[in-house]
Amino acid sequence: MSSAEVGGPTRTPRELGIVVGDLPTGRWNALTDVQGVRVGHTTLHDGTRVHTGVTAVVPDQLGRDAGRRPALPCGLCVGNGFGKLVGATQLAELGAIETPIVLTATLSAFRAADALVTHVLARPGYEAVRTLNPVVGETNDGFLSDVRARPVTEAHVLTALEAAASGPVEQGSVGAGTGTSALGFKGGIGTSSRVVEVAGVARTVGALVQSNFSGTLTVRGVPMPADELRPGVPEAAPVETDDGNSCMIVVATDAPLDARRLERVARRAVFAMGRVGAGYTHGSGDYALAFTTADPGAGLVEDAGLDPLFAATMDAVEEALLASVLTATTTVGHRGTRHAVPTGVLLDRLRSARPR
């Protein structure tokens, strides 16, 4: 049997007619709609043994000024801390990131952090640097991929960082989402964006997710249990296994916010997991990072003016989470199979639940 079975071309939620909320999206409906933010993937397959990879989120502002070490305001929300988010304590303490954000598999997070340090120290202006806080998130893809083999190398991380680009972002079973599982189905990478008016100025909020968590897939309030969408096709193992059960969320915005306000934004990103049926279980490492690319000299959005950004964040994260499973493909791994969502059955169920 092949390492991946593709049941026809994948489609995003919007291509399937599933629209989350009333707010408009950016041009690409992706994290990269926030100007100056790029995304890159490295995807690894080796028969049925290895399905894993790296996803890099690269804010351009971190590499612009070789004369100083730039940082961007960033907030962190830990929904449940059963995870290995490298760099979390300094990020929480100082409210800033000074490196790109890398996502990968659990036992590869530490090699990825070392590779990220290599990448940053090689930049002009960093010749005398003796301390650096790399930020690396992870989820455990050990059901479909041999996580103990730690197949991610420095070269894979550097490739994802160097390949990071603006424009459309590939979704589904790619990069850090290559071997993940979510909500009873194959999980993956998903992204979305929203444009809102804040204090009379159009602002963009983008989200990117790495989904690998349990629960019952819920689409626009309608439960989609895996055993009902795929009757007679038993799962080889529940989504939550001893491998863990997590979600990484990255939110970017061009709205001027400080770390405290960004932490509030990040909290809404974790809340949005509940909209798609997240189980929020004991073994789940649910993390959200929210950073801004705004001019440091711009006046901050007042707390009372955050509501549009909160709404944009929750809608963008919800759609990104749906995209992560709807664009994923059935994958045969070294311990079993994770099936793609049968979108035809899903749409029929959605129409039946909401007749027009």
Image (spheres, rainbow, N blue to C red):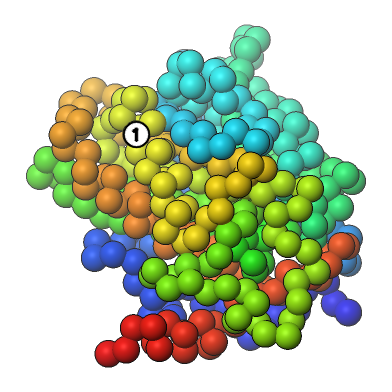
In this picture, is 234 found above or below 280?
below
On the image, numbered disc 1 is attached to which residue? 264
In this picture, is 116 found above or below 197?
above
Q: Position of residue 9 (x, y in %)?
A: 60, 82
User: The residue under label 1 is which amino acid type?
Assistant: Arg
- Quadrant hosting residue 120: top right
Nearer the observer, 184 or 118: 184
In this picture, is 140 found above or below 351?
above
**Quarter of the C terminus within the rendering:** bottom left
Residue in the picture at 66% in, 36% down: 83
Q: Is residue 32 left or right of residue 213?
A: left
Q: Position of residue 234 (x, y in %)?
A: 76, 76
Q: Is residue 194 left or right of residue 302?
A: right
Residue in the picture at 63% in, 42% down: 282
Q: Secondary structure at mark 1?
A: helix
**Quarter of the N terminus within the rendering:** bottom right
- Quadrant hosting residue 305: top left
Residue in the picture at 16% in, 49% down: 197
Tag count in the figure?
1
Nearer the observer, 94 or 162: 94
Q: Is residue 317 left or right of residue 249?
A: left
Q: Residues within 10 Å of mark 1 (few under 14, many from 20)?
A: some
